[in-house]
Image (cartoon, rainbow, N blue to C red):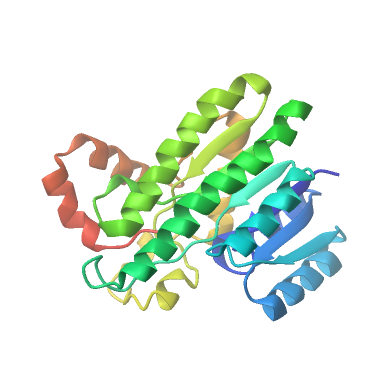
């Protein structure tokens, strides 16, 4: 039975990955900060799918939490989903620098360290995969959030280029607007967004697993967000910047 470790696993895209992978027969290691919610999620998944589920309570914005996740990864994981993340309500000039640094630790440092911790085992087995959850915002100049997600895309492509020859796959997942707790937690008013713009978390997880199996380096779920990503790469940055006032996740 293969094992998957998922960060930010109790809600949204992380929870969708947990359901999808449990249904596919993976045993799970769920990483999240809320110990009570984590235990409840683990119990529910185990009862529903009959697979082993290991909760790992860790705050990946801290050294202690990141080190705990690294240690578990080094013991052997077949699939890593780096999903944990958060957004800010205001622009980077309106956000305390401590919160900006916290975002960098979670979106960049934790992704780098967990990916590095997972890869040696995968390479030794000649198989395995890493999905680093970025965002369509990676292609738009929209503050620190967009910058961190752009880094995730670049880092994932670089890692994929180095490990593909070993039978290991690394992919950046770049969804658009997804119905999760993300926007509420960031206190972002999304009431004006049309219904067709939203994706389901289950759709995002399914598309990601399909694209990983195909060997893609970057996955952008749905045709409309593929078009957004393509246009953002073609248009001048000053024009693309006008779109960056919206937060994509």
Identify the residue at horizontal 49%, vertical 51% (top origin): 109
Residue 203 % position (x, y): 55, 54
Image coordinates of residue 226 in percent, x first then y, are: 37, 42
Could you tell me residue 61's position as x and y percent? 52, 64
Quadrant housing residue 64:
bottom right
Percent of width and height locating residue 11: 59, 69
- Classify the position of the C terminus by image quarter: bottom left
Q: Nearer the viewer, residue 57 or 43?
A: 57
Give the farthest residue toward the top: 165
Q: In this view, does 18 lie to the left or right of 220?
A: right
Q: Look at 43% across and 65% down and name the residue there.
A: 102
The quadrant the N terminus occupies is: top right
Q: Nearer the viewer, residue 248 or 33?
A: 33
Q: Can residue 63 be seen in this view?
A: yes
Left or right, 10 with reference to 134: right
Horizontal placement of 65 versus 249: left or right? Answer: right
Nearer to me, 95 or 183: 95
- The answer to whether 110 is drawn above or below residue 62 in the figure is above
Taking the spot 79% from the left edge, 45% from the top edge, the residue there is: 75
């Amino acid at each position: 039975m293969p094992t998957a470790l998922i960060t930010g696993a109790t809600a949204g895209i992380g929870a969708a990955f947990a359901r999808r992978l449990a249904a596919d027969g993976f045993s799970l290691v769920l990483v999240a900060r809320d110990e009570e919610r984590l235990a409840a999620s683990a119990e529910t998944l185990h009862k529903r799918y009959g697979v082993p589920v290991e909760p790992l309570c860790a705050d990946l914005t801290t050294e202690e939490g990141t080190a705990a996740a690294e240690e578990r990864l080094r013991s052997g994981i077949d699939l890593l989903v780096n999903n944990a993340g958060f957004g800010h309500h205001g622009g980077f000039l309106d956000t305390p620098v401590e919160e900006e640094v916290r975002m960098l630790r979670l979106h960049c440092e934790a992704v780098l360290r967990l990916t590095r911790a997972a890869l040696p085992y995968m390479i030794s087995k000649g198989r395995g995969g890493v999905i680093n959850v970025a965002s369509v915002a990676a292609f738009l100049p929209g503050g620190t959030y967009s910058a961190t997600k752009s880094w995730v895309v670049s880092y994932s492509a670089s890692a994929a280029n180095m490990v593909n020859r070993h039978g290991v796959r690394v992919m950046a997942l770049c969804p658009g607007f997804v119905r999760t707790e993300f926007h509420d937690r960031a206190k972002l008013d999304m009431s004006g967004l049309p219904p067709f713009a939203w994706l389901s978390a289950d759709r995002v997880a399914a598309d990601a697993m399909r694209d990983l199996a195909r060997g893609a380096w970057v996955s952008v779920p749905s045709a409309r967000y593929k078009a957004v990503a393509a246009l953002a790469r073609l248009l001048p940055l000053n024009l693309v910047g006008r779109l960056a006032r919206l937060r994509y996740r």
